[in-house]
Amino acid sequence: MKTRRLRSAAFACGLSFCTLAATRGALAAYPPPREETWIARDVRFTTGETLAEVRLHYRTLGSPVRDAGSVVRNAILLLHGTGGSGSQFLQPQFAEQLFGAGQLLDVTKYYVILPDAIGHGGSRRSPPPATRPTRS
């Protein structure tokens, strides 16, 4: 009798675990992000300083919907704190609550853009020159 109860309890725990795993998988049901880099050339700051180029890395989820004038009408730019990578929003604690069907930022409806801050993730300023001038 004791063995029977133990088996029943083990079966119930296993069933609960399987249900939890299936629910967790359903919550994460959104397409994988696409990663790209946009390059801004000859960047001039208000201080007068310039950079030859700045690489802005970003990820996108969903697809852009354009109007007759080719303007994207469903884009959402999701920014993080002052420094960091947009990939932080792909962590389960965020992504499972935001991007799935019927959720706040449902990527079947919206085109979500997750940029990296300059100096974080794949974003960076222009690379240093390949060779440095020598002093005579």
Image (cartoon, grey):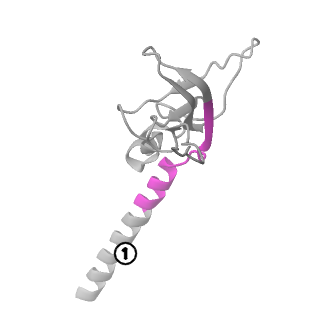
- In this rendering, position of residue 133 left or right of residue 27: right
> Where 82 sits versus 2, above or below?
above
Q: Position of residue 116 (x, y in %)?
A: 48, 37
Q: Position of residue 129 (x, y in %)?
A: 58, 43
Residue 64 or 124: which is nearer the viewer? 124
The residue at which mark 1 appears reads as 11
- In this rendering, position of residue 66 left or right of residue 86: right
Label 1: element kind: helix
> Where 83 sits versus 45, above or below?
below
Residue 13 or 98: which is nearer the viewer? 98
Residue at x-position 39% and y-position 33%: 80
Residue 106 or 129: which is nearer the viewer? 129
Farthest residue to the front: give it. 136
Residue 1 visible from this viewpoint: no
Q: Position of residue 6 (x, y in %)?
A: 27, 82
Q: Position of residue 30 (x, y in %)?
A: 57, 45
| Kind of residue indicated by mark 1 | Phe
Residue 70 or 17: which is nearer the viewer? 70
Farthest residue to the top: give it. 69
* Start-end of magenta stretch: 19-39
Q: Quadrant of residue 111?
A: top right
Residue at x-position 48% and y-position 34%: 103
Q: Quadrant of residue 37?
A: top right
